[in-house]
Amino acid sequence: MLTNAHLHFNESFSPAAFSDRLVCFSTGSKEEWEEVSAFAAKVNAAREGLVPGGASCLVSAGLHPWTLEKYAADDIDPHDRLHWLEELLADKGEKVAAVGECGIDLYTPQLRGLLSLQLSVFEKQVALAVRYEKALVVHCRRSIQYFFKYKEELKKLPSVIFHAFPGTLTECESLLDQGINAFFSFGNVFLRGGRKASECVRNLPENRLLLETDSSDDELCLLNSVFKAAAESRSLPESDLEEVCLRNFCRAYCLS
């Protein structure tokens, strides 16, 4: 069974297209949460009880660093927008697979200028994940050093899923050595031959690897390509890699 550890919803998706794999959709607002949750419910209704945890289509919720940039441009305080996330966790926590994606992005001058805001919003989301015992889906771009600074809080979480991890194999190992229950997910950059991503996919401990597509109109085609390339990289049959990622997906999202 294929697993997609991180995907953004596309209105062209149909529930039937997700009948044969596990996926976690990422949402960033109340409106998006409601739309994607309704979609996920249609997928899960047809598959109830067939997979660990009784659901094959999961939904996470959080404030992305890029969203903070948009709010700042519109003079909106993103802390106010965190209320929907806290209310969601309080009222429907059992339906929230994880908090995120959230994190820190220092790729552009504009984002670097919002560092204090990014840190504040990230800290609040980590605190919510700790309080409600949720996995955390992390966006990390040119900011890996901050996740070592937050290691004590991250260690309290059931798991931390580093989506599209941009770091080195040594940094993966260092995060694990800190006692963080970390999983590392790879997709487009790995397919394009990114050196660091390729090294991680090839050499990560088997029980820490996840694969994803992030965003794609043709999600299944891309997911198949990611699995094929990763299986070749690790010198594994694709079926064996699917079993590895299935176990890791279930552990990362606390399905078993």
Image (spheres, helix red, strand yellow):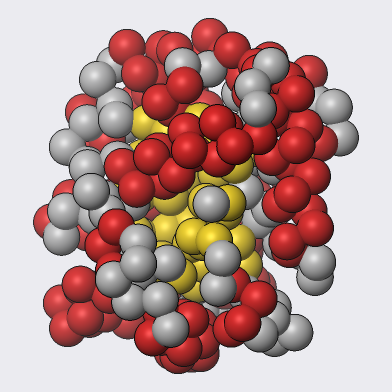
* 201 vs 75, nearest the viewer: 201
Percent from the top left, x then y, of residue 134?
A: 24, 55
Percent from the top left, x then y, of residue 208?
A: 43, 27
Q: Quadrant of residue 73?
A: bottom right
**On screen, 9 above or below 182?**
below
**Side of 63 where 195 appears, left or right:** right
Percent from the top left, x then y, of residue 13?
A: 69, 81
**On screen, 127 above or below 162?**
below
Does residue 99 show up?
yes
Q: Residue furthest right?
A: 192
**Side of 57 where 129 appears, left or right:** left
* 222 vs 118, nearest the viewer: 222
Does residue 37 show up?
no
* 74 vs 204, nearest the viewer: 204
Q: Residue drawn at (24%, 20%), measured in percent from left and top?
A: 179
Q: Residue drawn at (47%, 33%), measured in percent from left and top?
A: 244
**Side of 105 where 244 appears, left or right:** left
Q: Residue drawn at (39%, 20%), measured in percent from left and top?
A: 175
* 40 vs 104, nearest the viewer: 40
Number of marks drawn: 0
Q: Residue drawn at (78%, 18%), measured in percent from left and top?
A: 195
**On screen, 177 above or below 70?**
above
**Side of 169 where 195 appears, left or right:** right
Percent from the top left, x then y, of residue 44?
A: 41, 79
